[in-house]
Image: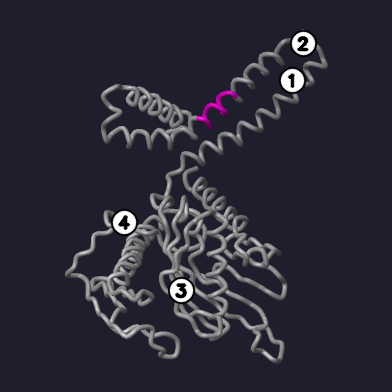
Amino acid sequence: MSLAENLQRVVSRYDELEDLMAAPDVASTGAFVDMSKEYAELTPIIEGIAQLNSAKGEVANLADLLADPEIESELRELASKEFQELKESISQLEKAVQLLLLPKDEADEKNAILEIRAGTGGDEAALFAAELFRMYQRYSENHDWKFEIMEMSETGIGGCKEAIASVVGRGVFARLKFESGVHRVQRIPTTESGGRIHTSAATVAVMPEAEEVDVHIEDKDLRIDVFRASGPGGQSVNTTDSAIRITHLPTGIVVSQQDEKSQHKNKAKAMRVLRARLFEHQRQQADAKRAAARKSQVGSGDRSERIRTYNFPQGRITDHRINLTLYKLDRIMDGELDEAIDALIAEDKSSLLADIS
């Protein structure tokens, strides 16, 4: 199907929805909600098509004007300049409309579960993991998202072995999904007396938070263990068996929660994380099939892939998937991640366009 035919199909559907929603007997039905949602999703595409058609109309008018042999030279020069500018803008407008037509990730509007684990590097890796966790917390605050700490396994010196958070807000997963992977840090640890630069790493996983309708979990597929929670160094958090460990037997996925004093609250949190991990497991299986057919994509999506390096002595971060280097490490660690994330989203859209062209 050509671009023109695709655009006409969208316009026809938009007009159809407008007529259906105007019918007096539809407003009180559940179908109205679905139609309103589809109508809202199509509106920016229709606006883009209108801009494109307007530019094409102006180009046609200018072409007629330039074809007139009696046109004054000064007016011809102005018209010719505007004609060239509009022709260039048409290709940009067409690309913008094509981007709007790209299939959306169904999980983009979902909330997210963020997991960070210290990797190679001992105490330094744990300190870096804690800094990454704070970076995403500040980024969430900058976007007015709700950042809820679900689990935090601290080391006692300001680091953390593992941290899990729920991030709630508009478009959370769409902006955070490219953060999954291995984040590497290069710097001189505070414990290093010789002034040598060490390399450590932490693993980040961002999963869309799944609803119960997204993932069906059978009770018979779960093994639930209850145990006594403990803090750093074996310090008792409370004296009741409130900690929960849930094992999903078919996949072997294990989730533990012990931050709450209530066993029921820990179980509810653990089920949220388990649901997200199972949903992500399903998505990864589907993505693997799609990836085989794609010509290009932003990274492999594999959590073991090294995606970014944070070099403190040089004050830079480098994203290895798109060869992006930014010399603003302090600001990025303070939660100013938009420039890096916007570049990743733009690259992903470009690769999707390349696949369909």
Which portion, as a residue range, is magenta?
A: 47-54
Q: Amino acid at mark 3?
A: Ala
Foreground: disc 4 or disc 1: 4
Image quadrant where one finds the N terminus: top left
| 29 vs 345: above or below | above
Query: Helix or strand or loop: what does disc 1 sit on?
Result: helix
287 sits to left or right of 48: left
Q: Amino acid at mark 2?
A: Ile
User: Mark 2 packing: few (<14 Cα in 10 Å), some, or many (20+)?
Assistant: few
Circle 2 is placed at which residue position?
71
Circle 1 is placed at which residue position?
79
Q: Amino acid at mark 4?
A: Glu
Foreground: disc 3 or disc 1: 3
Q: CA distance from mark 2 to mark 4?
A: 66 Å
* Mark drawn on residue 163: 3
Q: Indicate which disc, 1 or 2, sits on the residue closer to the N terminus.
A: 2
In this view of the protein, which residue sits in the foreground, 325 or 150? Answer: 150
